[in-house]
Image (spheres, grey):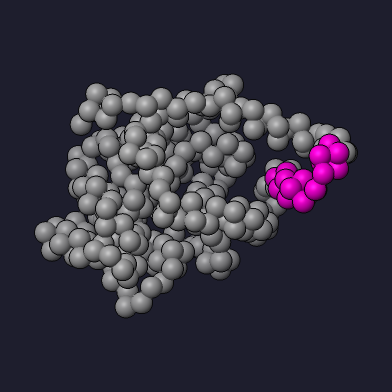
Amino acid sequence: MNVVSVCMITYNHEKYISEAIEGILMQRTSFSVELIIGEDCSTDNTRKICKEYNEKYPDKIKLLLPNKNLGAMNNFITTLQYCTGKYIALCEGDDYWTDPYKLQKQVDFLERNDSFNLIASKNYILNNGEIKIKHNLKFFPKYEFKIDYYLKYRPFQTASILFRNNSNSLPDWFTKVMAGDKFLVLLAVKDKKIKLLNDYMSVYRIHKNGISQKTRNNSTQNFYTYLKYYNDYTNQKLSKLLSFSLRKNKFTIELQSKKGLLEKIVFILENISIASFIFYSKFINYIDFETKITFDENIKF
């Protein structure tokens, strides 16, 4: 059995998929790694590129080629079910890894620390052809935390994570969620902890055809809906946090429905406790800043 399975889903990523695959192939590890690619009937050259890599590295790459388009979530679940490794890492076809020791560092940590189920790292942002680092100025950032902190701040991106393989026990409602990666984090961590490495190991690419950009609004509403299912699944583990999150979401939706400025102000004053927290969070995000970097100077291979 492979120690790590890398789950990679892709659709119309012909411009990016080679970079994503190369980031996995360059990993230097003392253990075996398999790459499972779910190619979802792209209409561009993505499938052709994936086949070429599969032919060149048949011992490292398992390529899944459905006969019809499955859709992002079904493709994700199908690809995930082919991951047999002790640990699973995620990297979508438009993101990529930059640290050749990413998997080795992360596996070494989880092997030594049974109280952690998932490990992640910081990441670069690639937007409009520029690599940037996002500096977050939240007070007292944590590098070891549980689910409640993750749900409040979402301090890492999908391409940075590695977790213990529990994918064989996914609940039925998992097929209906839109933010599959976020719920997979919740299901993987359970009642244990998350480790965030203070290393930059991956690149999160922002582009107009990315899944997260296309489904942002619907995905947010869907996330809160199925967070209730997760709460039931964990025997009300998140009841207090979930109640607050739902209040926050309801407040945001109702505020947007208010037409006049006066009507908005009255509504805010009537809900001052939740409003003050949201505005504080917005302020903290506002004072986050990004620094443009030169790729060759800052990312070491």
What residue appears at the point 31 percent right and 44 percent down from the top-left corner? 96
Please tell me whether residue 93 is drawn above or below residue 123 in the rendered image. Answer: below
Point out residue 137 in the picture as x, y percentages from the top left corner. Answer: 54, 23
Point out residue 48 in the picture as x, y percentages from the top left corner. Answer: 20, 65
Q: Which quarter of the rendered picture does the N terminus lie within?
A: bottom left
Q: Is residue 83 visible?
A: no
What residue appears at the point 45 percent right and 56 percent down from the top-left corner? 211
Q: Which quarter of the rendered picture does the C terminus lie within?
A: top left
Q: Nearer the viewer, residue 295 or 120?
A: 295
Residue 253 left/right relative to 183: right
Q: Nearer the viewer, residue 255 or 157?
A: 255
Please tell me whether residue 153 is drawn above or below residue 216 in the rendered image. Answer: above
State which region is magenta: 245-265
Residue 267 figure quarter: top right
Residue 36 figure quarter: bottom left
Q: Nearer the viewer, residue 86 or 200?
A: 200
Residue 155 left/right relative to 31: right
Q: Nearer the viewer, residue 280 or 262?
A: 262
What residue appears at the point 58 percent right and 36 percent down from the top-left corner? 153
Residue 11 in magenta?
A: no
Residue 244 left/right relative to 80: right
| Residue reaching furthest to the front | 260
| Residue reaching furthest to the left | 56
Residue 247 in magenta?
A: yes
Point out residue 22 in the picture as x, y percentages from the top left corner. Answer: 21, 47
